Image (cartoon, helix red, strand yellow):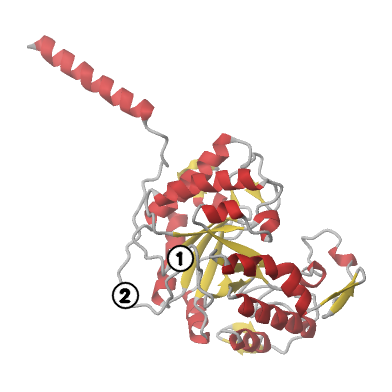
Amino acid sequence: MKFVIIITVMLCAMTLFISCINTPPENKSNTTIFDFTPRETALPIPTAGKLPASWKGFNLLNMFYLRGQTTDTPFNEKEFKMMSDWGFNFARIPIDYRILIKANDWNNMNESAMRRLDKAVEYGIKYDIHICLNLHRAPGYTVASPAETTDLWTQAKPQEAFARMWGFIAGRYKNVPKENLSFNFLNEPARVDEKTYADVIKKAADAIRAHNPDRILIADGLDYGVIPSALIKGLGIAQATRGYQPFSITHYKADWVEGSDRMPVPAWPLIENGQIQNKEWLKNTCIKPWKELVKSGGGAMVGEWGAHNRTPHDVVLRWMEDNLITFQEAGMGWALWNLTGSFGVLNSGRNDVNYENFNGYKLDREMLTLLRKYL
């Protein structure tokens, strides 16, 4: 009898050992399922082949960048209510992945940070604003400083971490309908060929779809988001572009852009290098390939656009209206960078605006009125 018991115990131990070595590594934090309560919504139903042209809103930067020991600022319900009251229905949430993990361990998700992210999803549902989660910095890639010490495009470990992180997020929010929530993989890929980019995105897409095959997925275009990809479209994934051209208007005297202090004072329309840049130039140079993507059955939107606060306000407003007309004609929704901050309608710090005191913020009413004109 003892012999039988010993053999049984050994077999169980061996089974457990084999199971462990064959099981892929999981996040150390168990996935908590977001508690979603179904409610009536007026939000449009998106598809990978047709993102809603009515998606219009802002980027919210509460988890945008890890600064020292300060991980982020809590999402403010008042801002969601204001967006909803003004008629906007879309918020992109750029996230620095370092906020979502503990001790720089890619496998150890930070539950307290995830609970803060839960609030954005919760407020979106409450105020009928579609939430789009974006990894603005991901394992192995960022457009910001400092650069990542690993390379997402060539190294297996960051690719695995990238996919695993998206799988974790997908599992947490798997009960949230696609009307309310979408995922935008990675901010502004650069210095990568189309096939490599599509291969990396597919790994993350597979990890997401293992939890929720119906989730709407959005990949930024190539070359910092400005070139659509046929390979990405073939994966059943929508795409996002940018509205930051001409750069001499949008990033004039932006302290994070080298040489921006030497740019000429912006004008719009303008002549640059002998070329007239105006609304037609925006249509033909910046939006035409994206309009063609939409016509061919590819979902597309403008994930970021706007102009920094050092550009004269009247120039910004003229440039913005030409962009808004162009986006509208192309059938593309948009998210201004940002709601609150130097590109936005609240607390932008412009010195040539007569601000309105509004709910504790300094509101650029003229810019807000222009945006609402194209809802």
Q: Residue furthest left?
A: 1
Image position, residue 364 (x, y; %) = 66, 85
- The residue where tag 2 is placed is 39
Task: Mark 2: give few (<14), some (14-19) or many (20+) Cα within 10 Å.
Answer: few
Q: Amino acid at mark 1?
A: Thr
Instruction: Identify the mark nearer the N-term, 2 or 1.
Output: 2
Left or right of 71? Residue 170 is: left
Task: Mark 1: give few (<14), some (14-19) or many (20+) Cα within 10 Å.
Answer: some
Of marks 2 and 1, the one in the foreground: 1
At a point 59% along the width and 73% down the height, the residue shown is: 334
Q: Quadrant of residue 309?
A: bottom right
Q: Quadrant of residue 28?
A: top left
Query: Quadrant location of the N terminus?
Result: top left
Q: Secondary structure at mark 1?
A: loop
Q: Secondary structure at mark 2?
A: loop
Please say whether residue 103 is visible from this viewpoint.
no
Q: CA distance from mark 2 to mark 1?
A: 20 Å
Image position, residue 349 (x, y; %) = 72, 77
Query: Quadrant location of the C terminus?
Result: bottom right
Image position, residue 185 (x, y; %) = 54, 54
At a point 48% along the width and 50% down the height, the residue shown is: 205
Image position, residue 374 (x, y; %) = 60, 85
Q: Is residue 299 above or below residue 340?
A: above
Q: Amino acid at mark 2?
A: Arg
Q: Is residue 169 above or below residue 21?
A: below
Residue 79 vs residue 288, the one in the foreground:
288
At a point 55% along the width and 85% down the height, the residue shown is: 359
Left or right of 8? Residue 82 is: right
- The residue where tag 1 is placed is 47
Q: Quadrant of residue 358?
A: bottom right
